[in-house]
Amino acid sequence: SSFGCPVDAIFVSGIAGSGKTQLVQAASGLLTSMGWVTIRSKFERGKEHASRSIVSSMFDELISHLVKLKEEGGPPDVAYSQRASNAILDVIGYDNLSLLVDFLPSLPQLFGGIFNREKTTQAEMADFQLTHFLSKIIEALSDSGWFIMICCDDLQWVDRTSMSLISELLINIGSSDVMRRRCLFVGSHREDEIDDGHPLLIQYSYLQMSSNVNTTEIKLRSLSKNDVTEMLMTDLRLPRRVVVELAAVVHKKTSGHAFFVVELLNSLVRKSTIAYSSQKCSYDWDELEIELIQTGDGVAGLIASNVESLPNLAFAQILSCFGTQTETDLLQILEKYQQGIMLSLDMFIEKGILDQAGGIFIFTHDLIQQAVYESMSMDKRRQLHLDLGRHLGSIANINATLTIDSGDGDNGQVQLEPVNDHVFFSGISMTSHLICLACDQVDCVGPEFIGDAYQKRRYAKWNLSAGEKSQYHSNYHAALYYYSKGIEFLGKDCWKNSARLCLKLHVGGALSSFSLGEFDKAIKYAESVIGRVAFKDTLVAQQVILKSLTQSRKHDECISRGIDVMRQLNFDIPLCPTKEIVMNTMASTDRIASKYSLDQIVEMCEMTIDDSAYRIVKILDAFYLACFTSLSPFLPLVACEIVKMSLKHGVCHESSTAFAIFGSYKIALDGDYAAGRYWGEIVRAISKKLNAMKKSEVFTTNNSDRQNFFPPLLLYLSNDIWFAGPREISRRILSFHQDAMNMGQFDFAMMSLGQSWRFLLYGGENLSLISKSINDRTKMIAKHSRYATQSVALDNILLVELMGPSTSLDERLCFNINDVQAEAESAKDNRFLFIIRVFSLMIAYWKGDYRAAGEHSHIASEMYPMSKMPSIHVIFFTFFRGLVAFQLYSEDGDDYRLKEGKEMMEKMAVWAQISMHVFGNKWLLLKAEYSASVHENNQAEHLYKKSISAARDNGNIHELGMSYELLGNYYLANGSKEDSTHYIKKAFLCYQRWGATVVAEKVLHDHDLDIASIVDTELQLGNSKHPRQWD
């Protein structure tokens, strides 16, 4: 790609054997000769669960290439490898590289200091994090001068998550000028095996819509009769007139199928049907004999007829059970099962059945592998798979810590054979542990062909071990596959005969399904556990159900279930909490917490939490978000319980979330802002301590999880708002956003990105600046976080209302507030519904529609219960609610409106005492409006001007314009036209400077002013002075 162009992604399609792979190999060979680095993967029929391992092996080739340069190259190669390694280290960092060791196992050979982190960290690395880190590595290599070709063959057998990872990676590559000019993707697939719901077709459509990717499809057609004629002329070195009839027969029998043509011709040569004639000094054949040849129903039939005559066919049949390629180490293990395999390899290569690439032996075509495999009867295949599985399982490493009570006398420790934890290459660039390969063989047989109940339980245990191994390495698709197979082996009476084993398999299935985003399936697996084992053994399943319900936006159901679980855990949680109950719980928790200093609480991070207590904390933590989203009164109660448990058993990352919520409610319910700030300091100290412990490799139960990004973000959004202005908080959130991006925590990164821009919007940042990058920002957020996208939609709606339709917002990213509201109502997202009403209130106010603003204000006030969490929306709701109330009072004289406005003014006065620079101009403006409403004219004029001064001093240009406008309206209402015009012009200039074109034009229209006069006089003054210098 040239500079500024998207990355090229080429998809080659055709039927099996049409030459797709050969075409891609020819292209990669050419590019390799020009200095490109080519990485390859090939997916396999029936092994979609191995897709992630296949992709892992492909990208590990990049690291292996650097390792080879480092260990085997000359001084220039070593120096080059070092530069590239340093570039990777600079953009990833040691901590993040350690997260990637499982996916890129060659990393420790390149970076000596890299080690494998605790598995709870590994297991929670989501695909979007992996995509981010891979993009950074490819970018670093591209910056170092690499050109990279990514080849993926047989994409018709890729699984959903791996295809999505490839697609997202391509989009990320296309977003960088360096990467897209130095990377090329080529994928191939069988077009007749792709249906409408196939992952490849879905992601291909997604890539076509991306401006970062240029997709090209190459469809390989069948060979024409003329193509076959040209082949024969070249290979037999005969003129066209001699081979044309032979070509017609071959084309007729093969339908122009390229691989079929080659196999048929090879077969004719092997059988001497086509043979060299010494009399004619050329090749000769009997066309009638060729005409009578039966080629079967297709390519496989012809190939099968060719392979059945192979000597030592049984050896090839063993290899075919493992897919299209097998490495030497595994073959040496198989040699112990069937002597002679290693000696037969050269013969298979000579016969064109196998190729060799380093230590890997590969079938020359997957159709040949398929033909060899299908040369066995079904019964023979099953028996061979079973024998191979038993052989591999006898030497596999089954997790030595696995203790299973089967419930039928087969209790206690699993009997383990000799340990072998080597990672093998098998199938198609697929890295697997031996136990996984053993399970793959046994699972091909299935439980229906194994009659012995003991053997079925044995294979179920193997699948459990393989599932845990895969889950440990974040390969959730494979893990889910093995867990489900293990359940199948136990059969319908599994809970009766093997309860403990069944429990582990179902919980594993639930966790893997949740990690794959398959929440309904996760709930189904977890629900199978409930009621079949003791309640204490269902806690992990309960946690999965709660988190799945939250992710499915079934918040009410999640809260109801969570409270039921808490009551079963003997927590005294009321079914209908009142304000009094919440306040009493807060007070009792505060009394307990007051016994400890900040330092003492932070020292509790070093305590090891009892497993049972930690499980309970995780249960409570599982439905935080549902309570938070639905504005549930249970949120402070749950937070209080975790605070008390943490102070008793030890502090963990989940504790800091509870402490942050507790501090926020100290402000919201008690009005104790000092206490809220103190708890914020505790949260930050805990996060600092836990992260320091992680970096120092001090691991305990409570700090081995990944860094918890929720507490600091929660502090920015609900605690810091009382002590710092919106623009300052926006700066802090942007810094947090970068940290989250660096760690690949895209949910938090996108949420924080959206919030940082919202705070700028609230803080009076220039709207043109906010709007300038709105398209890219919205697309980036939409790609990673649906919830954050909804939030950004409101910002976009408000921007359009303030700036007008001429804003640079892409039409495809335009939102309708009614649609956004309908979706929030459907999800029962009360918190977001409140925010929507606040935005509707502000939009109506800026339009001058105070009646509509009043209606939105009333609805929002009823949605703001005693369980409220502080937020910037509450601050601006209070401010605009007060302004609207005073406007409506001036129109209809309703005393209720005056009382409402006064209440908002008094609330703002309390906040101004906490932080005058944050709330001062808002309080003074509300106070001025109140004075004007009760005809305290001298006081009102004085307060308006003080509000102007405070807004000007703090650079709040939007609120400065608002103060000017309301002062102008005040003068107009009191008959001072000249003074009114003076301040209305200043309001116009402020709104213009802010970028609110629609609001500025409305001010002119409402006051029937000539913009020319403003341009000639006040605009000149405005251009020469900063707003802080205006009178």
Image (tube, rainbow, N blue to C red):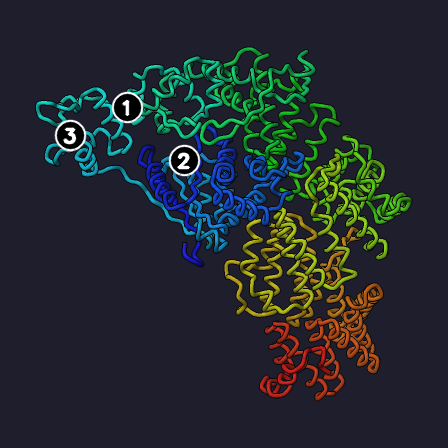
Q: Residue 231 at x, y = what percent? A: 21, 35
Image marks 2 and 1: residues in contact by CB distance under 8 Å: no
Residue drawn where x is 32% and y is 15% of the image: 311
Residue 871 vertical placement versus 311 (above, below): below
Residue drawn where x is 57% and y is 58% of the image: 777
| Nearest to N terminus: mark 3 or mark 2 | 2
Q: What residue occupies the far front of the structure in this picture?
A: 75
Q: Secondary structure at mark 1?
A: helix
Q: What residue occupies the far left of the structure in this picture?
A: 279
Q: How busy is the neighbourhood of tag 2: few (under 14 within 10 Å), some, or many (20 plus)?
A: many
Where does label 2 land, which residue? Answer: 154
Q: Which mark is residue 504?
A: none
Q: Amino acid at mark 2?
A: Asp
Q: On the rendered image, what quadrant is the N terminus found in?
A: bottom left
Q: Secondary structure at mark 3?
A: helix
> Is residue 516 in sight in this rendering?
yes
